[in-house]
Amino acid sequence: MKTLLIVDDEINLCRLYEKQLSKEGYNVVLAHSGAEAMTKVNECSPDLVVLDIRMPGMDGIETLSKILGKNNRLPVILNSAFSSYQNNYMSWAADAYVIKSSDLTELKSKIKEILDKKIS
Amino acid sequence: MKQIMPVDEKLDHVRKALQESEQRYQSLVDSIPDIVFTLNENGGIISVNNEFVYSLGYPREEILKTPIIDIIHPEDRSKISAAIKVITATGQVIRGLECRIMTRNGAVTYHEINQCGIYGLAGELLYIQGLAHDISERRKAEERITHLKEFNESIFNSIRSGIVVVDPNDSKVIMANRSYLKQVGLAEEAVVGHKYDEINQALVRPAGSPCCLSLLKNTLESGGIFEMDCLRSLDGLETRHFEIATYPIKNQKNEITEIILIERDVTDRRRIEDELKNHVTELSILRDVGEAIQSTLNLDEILHTLLVGVTAGQGLSFNRAFLFLLNQEEGVLEGALAIGPANPEEAGHIWEDLDRKHLSFTELLRSYGDPMTCPNTLVNQVVHKIRIPVTEDKNTLITAMMEGKSFNVIEGLIEGDPTRRIEDDLATRLSSKDFAVVPLYSRSKRIGVLIADNMITRTPIIDQAINSLQIFANHASSAIENSRLYGELEKKYYDLERANNLIREKRAELLEAERLSTVGRMANILAHEVRNPLVVIGGFARSLKEETPPDDPKRDELSIILSETMRLEELVRNVLEYAKFAKPKIQPVSVSDLVRQVVDMVKYELRANHIHFKVDVDEDLPPISADENQMRQVFLNLLFNAIHAMTSGGDLGISAARSGNFVEIKVADSGCGIAEANINKIFSPFFTTKTRGSGLGLHLVSQIISEHGGRIVVASEEDRGTVFTIYIPFA
């Protein structure tokens, strides 16, 4: 079973992701800040990270660079309410950029796609 | 018996008788009103009568024995001496000897003296008897008459008019004054004694002018005064104009004794009158043309007016006029416009028509209609074909234009310079070898040339006409120049207007940017504060729907929640797409400029709300590095906030000063203030105590300021006012 780390300061959003992605057959681990995400990356060795960008304290871009600094093979999907970060060169380092939507179809297919690629 | 007297008694008697006779003689002599004197043979005075003593003033005892010549005027003494000699030698009687006698007080008296010798029985000379008659009065009268005669003669001769006196009986000239002789160029002998009419007839006149033979006849027949004009051309070249008048002189019987003819040379006067008349005409035409030209700044209309003025009967009356203008860019003098009939038939029609109508210049101008509607007349076609490069400096038209000279071309030759011919090509095109060329120039600027001719009437072009043409051209030139200047001005004006439009556009862009910047901010808020909850709501609705069996009525309601959520998400997406355009542009920004701009933008609101404002910005502040639009948004929001807090007027102060590495900007109002409970919430999104506004204004302000590395502080007291203080780092 693949482990996904969901990083978002919005607790309700995390609960939605947890529910939906568990249904898809993933082991879902939650983190509510960049710092917590770093701990969870160490503790749970997730197969993929879904990372929010706009967070208090350490934001998603900074967290991304830290994660990659630690393990540059860990796939990361940036998941943001803002489309503007799509042009930030740091976000190019992520494997995908998905804009938040109540319809999680896009996010789910990106996760599957990336994990399938990783296996093969 | 005869009584015999003694001899002595007899002698006594004789002596007595003699004595009585002598006394009688003396008293007789004394009673004569003329001077009587006797002289001895040497001229010594023996006796004088009372008149002598009385009129000459010499006492008798003093004058006796004095030589007569002593009292004679020195110049006349020889005459008297000679007379005395003649009398003593020949016994001749001297009569009518005129000589001057000096009175005792030195006055000169004129006398006519008669002298004769008185002889004794033996024929011996006893004495010389003299009688002097005083002719002083007569002499004075004579002198007066002589003087008068000379005076009259000098007047007669010095009068500038020719005066001829004619004998009415034979019509011969009795006398003629010097001016007359000079005027007709004849010697006195050729005039005096000759018949006036014959003299007059012999004088050279211009062909066809009368010689005034009726004048004398009329005067003789009617006895009245007659006047007549006559032209004479004495040297066969210059025609001079005379006014001749006859004045009959009559005696008491009303018979004509003389006829006086006065001939006045009025050539100069007439010329001046004519010139004056011409000037008046010229001025009135110029006024008309001037008015017509001034009524427009349209170049075509000016040119048209000029040509109508040159060709109109009320104007300079040329048959045709051609206008050439200098095309500066191409360096070519090119035909621009022409007016005139194509041939004599057409001319006849046009001129007859105009004669009938008696139009004023302005009416005439109007009757031509729009100058551009008839460009296809023959003359216009002709003129449009003429193009002469400025480089052809020998060309007549180019020379006229470049040197500002006017030419009178006669038979293809330039008057005053017979070596120069006009170009055959020009003569052929104009079908004319006689025309005037005048330059058009204003100040030192060359405009073109004007050609005018009398191709139809063949009237020679005189210098006067060329002068008028030049005056005309000068006025037209300045009008053309004015028109050009106006054109340039107009162009400048358009440039200015374009610049203004550009500014307006830029301003609109600026406002759009402003709006976008607000939208951008809004979008951020939407993204963060709205999208996240929407995702959660929609996500769980979807999740719930999936878990609900298809026949459960809750499923429909969940679908409604889901679709409404998706509609909102779609809206947010659209807004975010729109907001992408607003990218921040960081550059050095002058705080003082910015404050000034912003205050300008809200001036109206400040006035409308009776708010006094005070700006105190340190002009020497270094620039901050910022997105100008966003910073403007900050100030606008703060100012509007302040204005909305002072609905019933107040004071607004804006200050900017250096504070370490920051600029410290204060916006202080005397408005309602912020309640203490709310002061921590004012920068939160959607917080507002106002009935209007989004509640985003101050949130945006704080967001922008923090993005610029600054901070904002608020201090407020209810009902006293609020002060926002912003710190932004210098660039």
Image (cartoon, grey):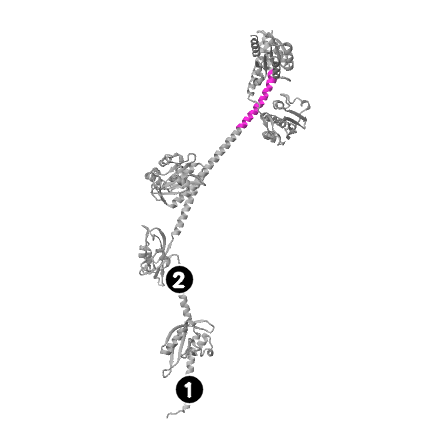
Query: Foreground: B578 or B76?
Result: B76
In the rendered image, the vertical position of residue B370 relative to residue B220, given as above or below: above
Residue at left offset 41%, top offset 67%? B143
The disc, 2 or 1, on the residue closer to the chain's N-terminal end is: 1
User: Magenta region's main secondary structure?
Assistant: helix
Mark 1 — on which chain does it sit?
A: B
In this view, the residue in front, B667 or A63, is A63
Q: Amino acid at mark 1?
A: Arg
Q: Amino acid at mark 2?
A: Asn
Residue B308 visible in rendering: no
**Residue drawn 34% across the image and 56% down it:** B185
Helix, strand or loop for disc 2:
helix
Q: Which mark is residue B15?
A: 1
Query: Where are the magenta residues, as a range?
Result: B505-532
- Give the letter of the chain under mark 2: B
What residue does disc 2 label?
B152
